[in-house]
Image: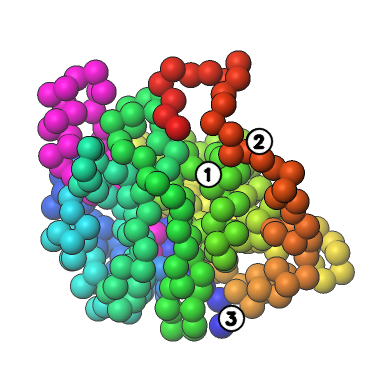
């Protein structure tokens, strides 16, 4: 295959209004399809517009939890039908009903309307309102069927991308492209981290954020190919949005990514995992001890 086109759907939501968000999400998916997208990527927790309760208010948490939806419910099913109609994959985000408390999830629906993977955010922001979310229990990668052939796709969500381990595990599982729904300000340091995740793992990365004034937009995508065949450094930026709403298509050169991964030195080529035991230790030493952190 020559390319994979990922549409970064940068929108503002209608608060927690499920039906209004469904209608707007469908409209943007149609725009993405018209723009030639193979995959349409939503910002984080689109079903309720990333609205969060005060964790100290039990009544607010209860009302918020009641807005969680089932993976096999009407909202997700609507977009499964839409994916079949448009012959386009959709990375749909939502507050997922889950035992013990809702999860912050994304389901990657393939162009046939099948759910290729569902991922729940592992690195929930436990220092903030996301303490009410149930963290995911692992990362996953799926072979996404596209018109041009299969692509190995993984997902991480917002704060996940600030931990090198998230993208690293996805790379080790075979990811070629990592989709990243987002809901926070994207400034130079977070953008720099995201560029690094692509470079160090030789993966393409695509992130969709909420438009201003809900967040600040700047949905962004980076390629993994950092050097040309002659060894000259190249800019890996594919597309960066401004702050306004829109559909921004990132075209990933899959042939180029695959050729680069076969010959370059990053990724899993020269790692020494036998020396990394401390990375899986549960111990936390000062100054990083936080009483609200969950392991």
Residue at 41% over, 21% down: 292
Quadrant including the C terminus? top left
Going by the picture, which residue comes out furthest to the right?
230
Q: Are marks 1 and 3 in contact (CB under 8 Å)?
A: no
Query: Would you identify the image quadrant in which residue 92 lies?
Result: bottom left
Callouts 2 and 1 close, C-beta under 8 Å = no
Q: Nearer the viewer, mark 2 or mark 3?
A: 2
| Tag 2 residue | 278
Q: Is residue 20 left or right of residue 39?
A: left
The Cα atoms of the two marked residues, 2 and 1, are separated by 20 Å
The residue closer to the viewer here, 180 or 175, is 175
Residue 88 placement (x, y as % from top left): 35, 74
Question: What is the x, y in percent for residue 12?
Answer: 31, 45
Picture mark count: 3
**Which mark is first along the chain, 1 or 2?**
1
Magenta highlight range? 40-68
**What residue is rendered at 69% in x and 58% in y?**
267
Q: Earlier in the sequence, mark 2 or mark 3?
A: 3
Q: Residue at x 58, y 34 (%)?
A: 281
Spot occupied by residue 216 in the image (x, y as percentages of width and height): 44, 39
Is label 1 in a helix, a strand or a loop? helix
Judge by depth and name the residue closer to the eye, 149 or 121: 121
What label does residue 161 carry, if any? Answer: 1
Using the image, determine if residue 32 lies above or below residue 146.
above
Q: Using the rendered view, name the quadrant where residue 165 is placed.
A: top right
Residue 58 painted magenta: yes
Q: Which comes sooner in the sequence, label 1 or label 3?
A: 3
Residue ID at (30%, 79%) = 112
130 is within the stretch colored magenta: no
The disc label shown at residue 2, or none: 3
Q: Residues within 10 Å of mark 3 (few under 14, many from 20)?
A: few
């Amino acid at each position: 295959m020559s390319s994979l086109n990922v549409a970064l759907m940068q929108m503002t939501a209608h608060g927690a209004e499920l039906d209004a968000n469904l209608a707007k999400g469908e409209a943007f998916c149609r725009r993405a399809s018209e723009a030639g997208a193979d995959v349409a990527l939503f910002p984080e927790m689109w079903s309720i517009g990333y609205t969060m309760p005060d964790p100290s208010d039990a009544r607010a948490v209860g009302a918020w939890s009641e807005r969680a939806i089932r993976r096999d419910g009407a909202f997700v099913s609507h977009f499964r039908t839409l994916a079949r109609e448009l012959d386009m994959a959709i990375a749909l985000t939502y507050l997922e009903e889950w035992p013990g408390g809702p999860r912050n999830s994304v389901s990657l629906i393939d162009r046939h309307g099948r759910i290729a993977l569902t991922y729940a955010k592992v690195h929930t922001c436990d220092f903030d309102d996301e303490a009410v979310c149930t963290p995911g229990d692992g990362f996953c990668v799926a072979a996404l069927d596209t018109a041009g052939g299969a692509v190995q796709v993984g997902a991480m969500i917002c704060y996940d991308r600030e931990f090198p381990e998230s993208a690293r595990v996805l790379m080790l599982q075979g990811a070629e492209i990592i989709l990243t729904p987002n809901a926070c300000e994207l400034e130079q340091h977070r953008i720099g981290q995201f560029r690094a995740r692509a470079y160090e793992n030789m993966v393409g990365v695509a992130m969709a954020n909420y438009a201003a004034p809900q967040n600040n937009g700047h949905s962004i995508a980076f390629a993994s190919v950092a050097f040309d065949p002659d060894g000259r450094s190249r800019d890996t930026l594919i597309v960066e949005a401004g702050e306004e709403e829109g559909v921004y298509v990132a075209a990933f050169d899959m042939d180029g990514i695959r050729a680069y991964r076969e010959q370059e030195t990053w990724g899993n080529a020269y790692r020494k995992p036998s020396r990394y035991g401390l990375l899986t230790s549960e111990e936390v030493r000062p100054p990083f001890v936080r009483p609200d952190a969950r392991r």
